[in-house]
Amino acid sequence: MRKIGWAHRRGIEEALARFGIDTRGAADGWGATLDSVYDGAIEALTSLDASFAKALAIIAEG
């Protein structure tokens, strides 16, 4: 069980690291960390939306 718990925590830490978030910053709670995750997701989705808009504009021109 200890190994499973460690692997799960490591997976969470690796996933948050993709957003540049260190889990040690969550010592006071996960609120600020979750805000950072949401902000990163919003930025990624906004960028993806812009990429799709450009691709559709190119297709429409063709």
Image (cartoon, rainbow, N blue to C red):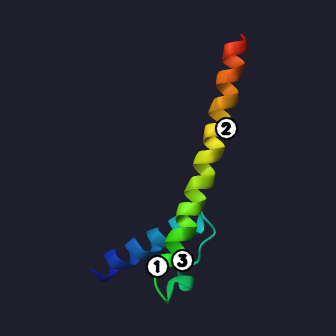
Badge 1 crowding class, 10 Å Cα cut-off, few under 14, some 14 to 19, many 20 or more, is few
Q: Residue 56 appears at what percent x and percent y?
A: 64, 23
**CA distance for labels 3 and 1:** 6 Å
Q: Earlier in the sequence, mark 2 or mark 1?
A: 1
52 or 21: nearer the viewer: 52
Residue at mark 3: 32
Helix, strand or loop status at disc 2: helix
**Which numbered tag is attached to residue 30?**
1
Check whether the beta carbons of the residues at disc 3 and disc 2 lie within 8 A of each other.
no
Q: Residue at x 58, y 77 (%)?
A: 22
The image shows residue 27, relative to residue 5, as above or below, that is below
Helix, strand or loop status at disc 3: helix
**Which numbered tag is attached to residue 50?**
2
Helix, strand or loop status at disc 1: loop
Q: Residue 33 appears at what percent x and percent y?
A: 53, 74
Q: Is residue 20 left or right of residue 13?
A: right
Q: Residue at x 59, y 73 (%)?
A: 21
Regarding residue 47, the answer to whether it shows in the image is yes
Q: Residue furthest top?
A: 62
The image shows residue 24, relative to residue 4, as above or below, that is below
Check whether the beta carbons of the residues at disc 3 and disc 1 lie within 8 A of each other.
yes
Q: Residue furthest bottom?
A: 28
Q: Is residue 31 left or right of residue 25?
A: left
Q: Residue at x 53, y 69 (%)?
A: 35
Amino acid type, label 2: Ala
